[in-house]
Image: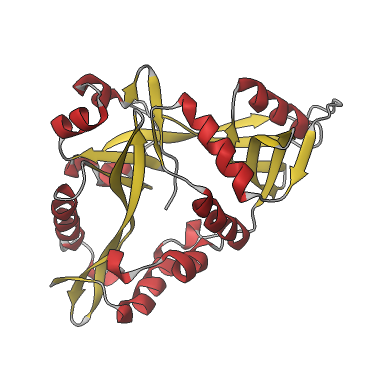
Amino acid sequence: MIRKGKASDQKAVYRLWKELFAFDDGGYSDYYFDALYDEKDLLVKEAAGEVAACLQRRRHQMVINGRTIDTSIIVGVMTHPAYRHRGYMRELMEQTLKDAAKQELLTVIQAYDMNLYTPFGFRAVNGKAEHVYAKSGDTFQIDLQEGYDAKSMAACFWESMASYSGYFVRDEAYFLRYEQEMKAQGLKCVRYMENKRCMAYAIYERGTDGIVCSEWMAVDAMAHEKLLKALRTRDQVTLILPIEYCEGGDPCDNTLILVHDEAGLCARCAISMEEVSEWKCNGKTWYLPEWA
């Protein structure tokens, strides 16, 4: 039986999440279930009176070519090990996408293995790439401020998105929640400031060989170079950045999109079919890193 989530499902879903995603937790699971989890987003395949498989569909908004549209992102796609290879997840995905098609023009999923979702019509738009920069030992001074500031970071984000034609909406309220998420995972933030304006910021953790930045935002190329140069004076810097997906690339950790109505999306966002197929508009790509 497929049914909507209930408040009583939370413990079972949490246990399954902790078990299946233990390799990529880092404190995020507890934060997610404390701050973001909502049974209204949950769809369950029930068997023998228990949660055999489930997924969650969280509502979001995206900006495409300057137009704001409603969308959603599918997260927490899980099947209990005792119930695998019975087609339960396919049933859940088909029902979820049927519901989504009635409410939005496109749906997003972020996948450890994209090959699981291409049969449903999803196509990759972003992957991830790792860039390593050795410690330079140079002297370079800019105004670096450690710590989180939602208002200035939100402003930096919106300025940075001028380089992209498609992205998730992130307002100041989002960044306030994001601070709690970063703390739950033991991550830190450093901001490059000029005249009280955040020019660039990095969300990072300290590794054995330096700092590893999981989010990097800069208002322009010069701000990017200045922040990178300043951080390299004291550490090796590893940037893990979203990239435009290309065929033959790593199938892991990709953002995928299913467009339910291409003609409707083109009309709503004033873009062409070709631009939809290439995830571009006016020569600018879409930026959809891993956010829930």
Q: Position of residue 76 (x, y in %)?
A: 35, 60
In which quarter of the view is residue 168 placed? top left
In this rendering, does residue 79 appear at all? no
In this view, the residue farthest toward the right is: 139
Q: Position of residue 59 (x, y in %)?
A: 32, 54
What quarter of the picture does the N terminus occupy?
A: bottom left
In this view, the residue in front, 79 or 84, is: 79
Residue beneath the point at 70% across and 43% down: 190
Residue beneath the point at 75% across and 34% down: 231
Classify residue 90 as left or right of residue 6. left
Residue beneath the point at 28% across and 46% down: 70
Q: Position of residue 272 (x, y in %)?
A: 22, 21
In this view, the residue in front, 117 or 174, is: 174
Q: Position of residue 268 (x, y in %)?
A: 22, 32
Q: How many marks?
A: 0
In this view, the residue farthest toward the front is: 195
Classify residue 216 as left or right of residue 119. right
In which quarter of the view is residue 65 placed? top left
175 relative to 246, above or below:
below
Residue beneath the point at 49% across and 47% down: 171
In this view, the residue in front, 156 or 43, is: 156
In this rendering, does residue 274 appear at all? yes
